[in-house]
Image (tube, grey):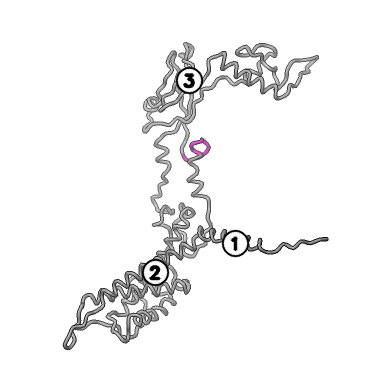
Amino acid sequence: MNVPIYPGSSSFIPGDTPFGFYDYDPQFQTDADKVVTFCSRRLGYPIMEVELQDLNFYAAFEEAVTTYGNELYAYQVRDNMLTLEGAPTTLDLNNALITPNMATIVRLSQQYGEEAGVGGNVNYYSGSIVLTSSIQDYDLAQWATSNGIAGGIEVKQVFFYPLPAINQMYAPYGGFAGLGGVPSAGIYGGGMLGSGYGTGYLMMPLSYDMSTLQAIEMSNQVRLSNYSFQLINNKLRIFPIPLGEDTHGGRIWFNYIKIEDRLLNSVSENPNGGIITNPSNAPYGNPTYSLINSIGRQWIFEYCLALCKEMLGYVRGKYSTVPIPDQNMTLNQSDLLSSATADRAALIERLRLYLDDMSKKSQLERRKDESEFRRQEIMNVPMVIYIG
């Protein structure tokens, strides 16, 4: 049986890795052969033969670096997605310092303003219906269909108000009774009442104007037909019931939005793929190996060893027993595979916990705790009382 084994040394050249992501990084070239020596010795060489070639070690090394970058940048995307969403995909985020912004949060909160009529991305439209004598109920959904509006409408405001009290208060002739039997409060000017010699008038207190407005409104509610409406499922019921003079073109105006606008305007199409819309197009690339610190490199070395264990386990699984004089030698495939699986899972978990500890949320919580502990420590310092 002729099984290729590790010869005891290696010499890395660009092109020896499957993808070549880091082949021309000088630090990667230097560490590649060191990693081969490290992994082979951890696998038992030279006491035991290692049925791997240098290319297998290089592939594991490249995969370990890429896995480290994937975990790191996936966490960066998750931690900064509210800031990154909508930014150009042409950015180089690998070594960028990201300052949080409010753009996405404002975009999310604009819809609350939309419901209040002070923001959002849905247009308001104006419509009207003609009043008909003795007809109290009007179907605005049917009105929308007759006006060619597909998908229905949502009425936001109905302009159906009585004459404002202020218009009834300042009647053109002071002293004459206003609408509903309430005397008008002044003439021509704001707050003016009565007249003296020449062009002199008496300025009344503002509280007088307010009480007069309230009196007019109360009089209209009690003595006259109250103007109001009820809107349920776009069925408009108006009060009072229209009279005969309403058949001559009287209208009620209202503001509405098209329901389909709320759905369609919430999606911004990006056919050219020019902005970040999800984690898959956030512009993070593979890490620059020479910029990874010793903490990251040690993780990469250990993960590379776990991958090499896995490869060696699969190789030895092909030759479960090796015949030797007078007996068969059983290889340790199962031990290698179980150890590799456990090591990889533990390393991934360790890296994710580390990144989670470095998140903005964790750092702010740690700073808050430090501030609280510092405050408690200061409170234990004796307060010296000075007597002058």
- Residue plotted at (68% across, 22% down): 209
Does the magenta portion include 118?
yes
Q: Which residue is mark 2?
A: 347
Q: Is residue 86 above or below residue 194?
A: below
- Residue 236: give x, y in percent of width and height: 43, 23
Tell me if label 2 and label 1 are in contact, CB under 8 Å.
no
Q: Nearer the viewer, mark 2 or mark 1?
A: 1
The image quarter containing residue 343 is bottom left
Q: Is residue 82 above or below residue 130?
A: below
Q: Is 34 left, or right, of 165 in this rendering?
A: left
Identify the amino acid type marked 1: Phe
Real-space Cα distance between discs 2 and 3?
73 Å
Q: Which residue is mark 1?
A: 373
Q: Nearer the viewer, mark 2 or mark 3?
A: 2
Q: Is 351 left, or right, of 361 in this rendering?
A: left
- Residue 132: give x, y in percent of width and height: 44, 15
Identify the amino acid type marked 3: Arg
- Residue plotted at (44% across, 21% down): 237
Q: Secondary structure at mark 2?
A: helix
Which span is picked out in magenta?
A: 113-121
Residue 251: mark: 3
The residue nearer to you, when weighing 99 against 143, is 99
Q: Which residue, as the protein is rendered here, is positioned at the far bottom?
A: 325
